[in-house]
Image: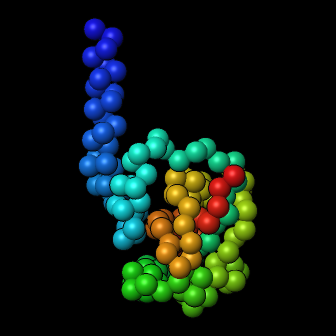
Amino acid sequence: MPPKPKANKGNKSSTDDSKKDPKSKASGGKSKNDSAAEGSSSGGKALKPATAINARHILCEKHSKKEEAVTKLKEGAKFDDVAREFSEDKARQGGSLGWKTRGALDAAFEKAAYDLETSTTANPKYVEVKTGHGYHVIMVEGRR
């Protein structure tokens, strides 16, 4: 009997891709690259646990302005250029927040950021999240 649950677990991981895509969209991950990212990382397990991330973000008070920024990203604009144009916070240097350790960020922001895989500003994988500060578009450049 114990081999059956193990076989089911194996089947679950092989079908995880079809289950993850809708789940990631429901959790606010609306990046055009999210489904591709899920598919490309399906060979490995999940992301390695990190104690710190190098993050960038675009912060907008209004949802409509955040949507304009996301549209620019979908059209192929570089993340740092869009951040300089649209972000309404002090991180106007391309949206760079630098290296942040766990516990140093807003809880909702942190959860979304630590669940995101790394990417580059030229081809960003991003997630959208709303916090008490406003609407964020987040990308992660490094993990350690």
Q: Where is residue 128? Give x, y as percent.
A: 46, 68
Q: Residue at x 31, y 14 (%)?
A: 3
User: Residue furthest toward the front?
Assistant: 43
User: Residue furthest toward the top?
Assistant: 1
Q: Nearer the viewer, residue 112 or 65?
A: 112
Above or below for 46 versus 54: above
Q: In the rendered view, how is the structure colored?
A: rainbow
Q: Nearer the viewer, residue 138 or 39?
A: 39
Q: How many numbered badges does the structure rendering display?
A: 0
Residue 28 seen by the camera:
no
Q: Quadrant of the N terminus?
A: top left
User: Residue furthest toward the bottom?
Assistant: 85
Q: Residue at x 53, y 79 (%)?
A: 122
Q: Residue at x 65, y 48 (%)?
A: 50
Q: Residue at x 56, y 77 (%)?
A: 121
Above or below for 10 versus 89: above
Above or below for 73 versus 104: below
Q: Quadrant of residue 71?
A: bottom left
Q: Where is residue 108? Give x, y as percent.
A: 54, 56
Q: Nearer the viewer, residue 121 or 136?
A: 121
> Does 85 sit left or right of 42 as displayed?
right
Residue 40 seen by the camera:
yes
Q: Where is residue 134? Give x, y as percent.
A: 54, 72
Q: Quadrant of residue 82?
A: bottom right
Q: Where is residue 83? Give x, y as percent.
A: 58, 83
